[in-house]
Amino acid sequence: MGPAASTYNTLGSSGFLLTSGAGRTTAEYTRGSIIYAQGDYASTVFLVQEGRVVLNVVSPCGKEAIVGMAGPGEFFGEGCIFEEDRRASSAVALERSLLLRFEKQDLKYVLRHSSDFCETFLHRIVQQKKELEEALADQLFSSSQRRLARILLVLSRDATGTELTSIPRLSQTTLAAMVGTTRSRISYFLGQFRKLGLIASTPEIRVNRARMAAMLRG
């Protein structure tokens, strides 16, 4: 019997996904905590239950780029399932985050033995890949202002598409790294968005999704 067999048989795939137990643990991280660093040994996959996690890469010359983000219901660190021995990026909590940590072998066992769990897992990974591809296209073809608008729209909903009251508290420096521009330009764009009624700050940013989407279509 494999490492997750008894747990899987009693809880089912949804139970395995949402609860701690053999082969998986719950961990809480405060804002700014490093969950793992680029180059660390990779043997676990994470599922976000609460909060947001940003993934960044530092080049050999020291330049930093944000390459992804995971929110509630989303996985990260899944590269280790496909024989990635070292982390290709660092993962940092953008806010207080509650995570489920899966051991690689335990998760692989359940993926092999539960078609329902495997379908759920693959659906979420494909969705995240699609968003990453859209972000890359945005980086290549859109202005910095439009890239910021799209990022704010993404941040204003969770993994199921449900709208959030406000987005996580992010520094303008972090937003600049996500957009690929300077902090001063982010400050300018946010000011313009406020004047246009696209966002409100209280102090967290609240996005008027209808107006923001209409602006991007225009």
Image (spheres, rainbow, N blue to C red):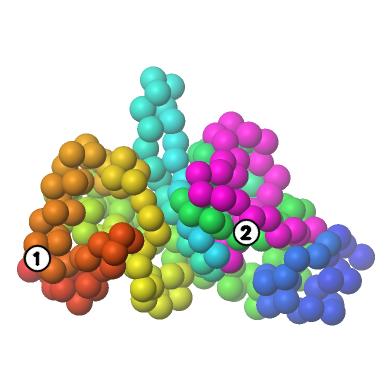
Residue 158: image tag:
none
Of the two numbered discs 2 and 1 in the rendering, the one whose residue sits closer to the viewer = 1
Mark 2 neighbour density, 10 Å: few (under 14) some (14–19) many (20 or more):
many
Residue where numbered disc 2 is placed: 99
Secondary structure state at the residue bearing disc 1: loop
Furthest residue to the front? Answer: 202
Furthest residue to the right? Answer: 1
Give the camera-side residue of 216 and 125: 216
Is residue 46 a member of the stretch shown in magenta? yes
Q: Amino acid at mark 2?
A: Leu
Task: Please state the horizontal and vertical placement of residue 97, each as a whole percent of the image.
Answer: 56, 57
- Dot placed on the residue nearer the N-terminal end, 2 or 1: 2
Is residue 113 a member of the stretch shown in magenta? no
- Residue plotted at (68% across, 49% down): 44
Placement of the C terminus among the 4 image quadrants: bottom left
Up/down of 147 relative to 85, above or below = below
Up/down of 9 relative to 97, above or below = below
Do labels 2 and 1 touch, CB within 8 Å? no
Task: Please state the horizontal and vertical placement of residue 38, each as a whole percent of the image.
Answer: 55, 34
Task: Please state the horizontal and vertical placement of residue 175, each as a whole percent of the image.
Answer: 30, 47
Up/down of 47 relative to 53, above or below = below
Mark 1 neighbour density, 10 Å: few (under 14) some (14–19) many (20 or more):
few
- Residue plotted at (31% across, 60% down): 203
Residue where numbered disc 1 is placed: 196
Task: Please state the horizontal and vertical placement of residue 26, each as a whole percent of the image.
Answer: 71, 60
Task: State the CA–CA distance, disc 2 to disc 1.
Answer: 37 Å
Q: What is the span of residues highlighted in magenta in the rendered image?
A: 23-49
Q: Amino acid at mark 1?
A: Leu
Q: Quadrant of residue 47?
A: bottom right
- Residue plotted at (58% across, 31% down): 39
Give the camera-side residue of 166 and 202: 202
